[in-house]
Amino acid sequence: MKTKSLILATAAIAALSACSQKKESGATATEVATADTTLTLPPPYETKSALHFSNVVGWPAGKTPQAPAGFTVTEFARDMASPRWIYVAPNGDIFVTEANTERKGAKQAVKNVVTGQSKSERSEASANRITIFRDTNNDGKPDVKETFLAGLNQPFGTLVLGNSFYVANTDGLWQYPYKAGQTKMTAAGKKILSLPAGGYNNHWTRNLLASPDGKKIYISVGSGSNVGENGIENEVRRANILEINPDGTGERVYASGLRNPVGMDWEPGKNILYTAVNERDELGDELVPDYLTSVKEGAFYGWPYSYYGQNEDPRRKGERPDLVKKSLVPDVPLGAHTASLGLAFYDQTAFPEKYRNGAFIGQHGSWNRSSFSGYKVVFVPFADGKPGKPEDFLTGFVAQGTDKDVHGRPVGVSVLPDGALLVADDAAGRIWRIVASK
């Protein structure tokens, strides 16, 4: 069976590669004006669609990721089963979601290979739990670590709102009665909203964010495919940010055309919604850039018909010129194939002034690029409410002297009340804590 699965995977990759190398005649580079600069995009298929997977080797003893001078990086937690997302409750409790893509037979194994999951991720079952941490001594080491909730279905986003604890499983939103300070969920929850999760579901994560006034909940739902190749009829309610009432009613699409909008947060002091979006594959090394963007109510951001504004995707050419025409240009390009997923605005004061009100973004890392991109946390400064150019903040995830080995893969980022930054390293099973050196 292993040989047969390998043959199937190889055949799938060969077919994918063959169909990805068609270069359009007469295609030229295009320029797109962004919030801070002019972005030059190469034509589709200028380079071949590459398959370049990372091999997670873990962190050697004593080694940590690297932050800029003036910061200290320490290990907050280890030996976790794919810690993917971090949520800090209003009382300071830290909830970490442990889950990953579930492997389901030979066909799913082929999809995992083609969509770039690392070896370590493909070989593990999803823990499907939420772990609570509490640092009551404020010494950077949790003195409470408990399984808060288990037996879930690929959970991701969590949220405390009033007396309710919400969990976004891949197939639905659950609501539980909650009392601040509890370390274990003992009450039964109820499913208040079903979410699409059938068929290909590599974009299985569903994130949650409450509106600043607590009257609405926003849910990110990624696409069910790369570029709608399984039929648009299979993308209903996907590639969107949905808005609902806290009881699950009143669903509407807040914004659409967002291929995989995992990270969501509000710009401090402005209450403007931002999202980090993981864009499409198989158009070449430099297409399509992931991005950070403000999210306008009712706006359309291109997927699957166009990218980075009104650049028509050749695989959907001529299908929806009306939607291409209305596609908005995102604010900040974050590099192609970086898998930009995490997002947290820095709303505290412990970091130096330049970091205040800026955005940290976790980049899980590429698989569809001839050389690695991502595998780091970047920072986007904001000045007068306008985003600037991304700069590296937490690096060192790619092992030196190799083009295949990585120590880990950062995803979720979150800011603690004391001003420290937490970074979830799901592939290495760790959480890193970054503080400004005293």
Image: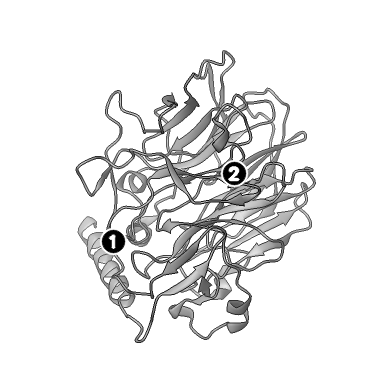
Tell me: residue 262, above or below residue 164. below
Outermost top residue: 137
Dot placed on the residue nearer the N-terminal end, 2 or 1: 1
Amino acid type, label 1: Leu
Q: Secondary structure at mark 1?
A: loop
Amino acid type, label 2: Gly
Residue 428: horizontal and vertical position, in percent? 36, 36
Q: Secondary structure at mark 2?
A: loop
Residue 120: horizontal and vertical position, in percent? 32, 43
Residue 285: horizontal and vertical position, in percent? 33, 64
> Which residue corresponds to mark 1?
51
Residue drawn at x 30%, y 68% is 12
Q: Is residue 263 left or right of residue 401?
A: right
**How many other residues sit within 10 Å of disc 1, few (<14), some (14-19) or many (≥20)?**
some
In this view, the residue in front, 369 or 134, is: 369
Q: Which mark is residue 157?
A: 2
